[in-house]
Amino acid sequence: MRKILCASLLTAGLFATTSCDNYLDVNTNPNGPDQVVAPQYYLPAIQSELALGIQFDSRYLGKYVQNWNHISANDPWDQHGYIANSDAAGQLWRAIYYSMGANLTDMITRAEQEEKWDFAGVGYLMRAFGWQTLTDYHGEVIVSQAFEPGRTSFDYDTQDKIYEEVRRLTLLAIQNLERTDGKVANSQLNQGDLIYGGDRTKWLKFAYGLLAINEHHLSNKSTYNPDKVIEYVNKSLASNSDDASVRFEGAVSNDTNFFGPRRGNMNSFRQSKFIVSLLDGTNPALQDEELIGKDPLTLFAEQHLKDPRLPVMLATAPDGQYRGVTPGVGVSEYEATKRPKNLWNTPTDVVAATTPNKYLFGNNERFPIMTYAQMQFIKAEAAFIKGDKAMALEAYTKGVKAHLDFVQKYAVNDAATPEDEAAVYTQRRALYEASEDLIPVSAEGLTLQKIMLQKYIAQWGWGFLETWSDLRRYHYSSDVFTGFQLPNPLYGLNQGKPAYRFRPRYNSEYMWNVSALEKVGGLNPDYHTYEMWFSKQ
């Protein structure tokens, strides 16, 4: 018998240890758990719920950052708006407070009681990563009072305090992960860890990566320390083999990647014009005139060399060309034969559950939450801001090549066709890497635009929050993000301003925590446009 509390209210979720997996069926009390189980039984659900929270809400955030947009015109999210009185875009809130919530507290407590310090360290990292993710998404959120028993209302913490808490928890995680006493040698972390399979060394690198993200988001502050960011990156992920990603099996819907065709969640989404411009040679910041007419495929023979990642990551239109949609306009701007296909490169909104995997959109595909390429672009930007252009170029080059490697493994090797995707990838990559405009050989050729646009490419389809943090740090500047244009018009309630945050989850905060929400301005119709603390000077 499954004793599960899957309520939608924050207040209910704060009082109960909950889960949604049958291997946690340990209760005799129908109203809640009456025992704390071994840590390895908590962790898989905690990790998958965090990934799913990001993926669920990427249906909305992905539109804000123009990874993709809706097929129909006047979509509110395409226009940086929102749906009032709705839990849309509130899944991450639910994941952090409810699905992870007290479960994570219990997991850490049990790990410490059993002296499983590596398990405790991973637990603290999951908590820290959750808070970092949630505050970068919503701004002010509930942290200090979040899991206090007996509370019926919860005050919001300011972002500066939450950032401090993320650092505190991450340093605590590092202390635990570095311990070798207790039962670390037989902690059973490998039995529950869907991300690193129990590899403590990789979790330490992840911790330093989180510190780098936390510190680097403060680039607009007078206290910003690029040397500290660079130090953290140097201790973080060392290669693509250190990438952090959550595993999905894909055999049944409940254990399938949210982006997989079996789930049917992304059928009405289409790639944006912006990402197409970054990969097809039309964006002036990633363009080399000497590569015009150099593409190996006859269809593109008169055009600029296509980025080798283009056919692997994106979809064609029925006529074989690559196009994207304009936010708020949808596919109707094109005649039928020129409309971009869906994310699996099939032409209709009806997608079979067994449609073959494409890039990150597969039933059993892992979902990244931190990558080596991402870390290198953070280092490149920090070094560029510091004025060390040589270091910036080295990190930029490593980042580009790492992501080219990351994508290449998804290229289909089909020698039976005249346009073998894997073979074309290799041909295009050689030309791409030889271009001194795309990958400069001297520091003078590197620009901030190149760094930020290559980072955007490397995070497309998964790194939505870090991309949005970048866009907000530069206040959506088209001088930095060359070719990026805010939707026109913006959502009516925005009063001409772009979105800087998502509103808290309706079915907890607007229903049950209104007095606290009112203190931070959350009842105002343009609250989602309030600038974040981290992006201010």
Image (spheres, rainbow, N blue to C red):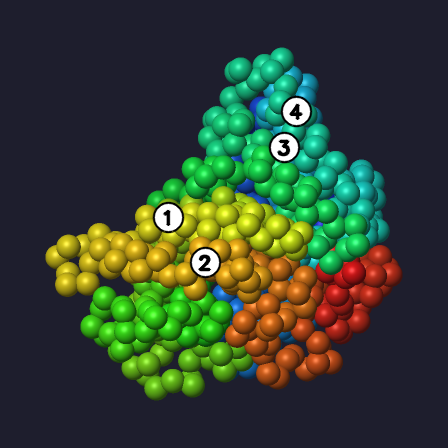
Element on which disc 1 rests: helix
Front disc: 2 or 1: 2
Front disc: 1 or 3: 1
* Circle 1 residue: 405
Amino acid, disc 4:
Asn
* Direction from residue 393 to residue 356 in the image, left or right: left
User: How many other residues sit within 10 Å of disc 4, few (<14), some (14-19) or many (≥20)?
Assistant: many
Structural distance between the alpha carbons of marks 1 and 3: 31 Å
Element on which disc 4 rests: helix
Residue 25 in view of the camera? no
Q: Position of residue 361 (x, y in %)?
A: 39, 56
**Quadrant of image for the C terminus:** bottom right
First in sequence, mark 3 or 4: give its number. 3
Structural distance between the alpha carbons of marks 2 and 1: 19 Å
Viewer-proximal residue, 456 or 147? 456
Amino acid, disc 1:
Asp
Structural distance between the alpha carbons of marks 2 and 3: 41 Å
* Circle 4 residue: 176
* Circle 2 residue: 440
First in sequence, mark 2 or 1: give its number. 1
Front disc: 2 or 3: 2
CB under 8 Å between discs 2 and 1 = no
First in sequence, mark 1 or 4: give its number. 4
Element on which disc 2 rests: loop
Q: Position of residue 442 (x, y in %)?
A: 48, 56
Element on which disc 3 rests: helix
* Circle 3 residue: 123
Structural distance between the alpha carbons of marks 3 and 4: 10 Å
Residue 370 in view of the camera? yes
First in sequence, mark 2 or 4: give its number. 4
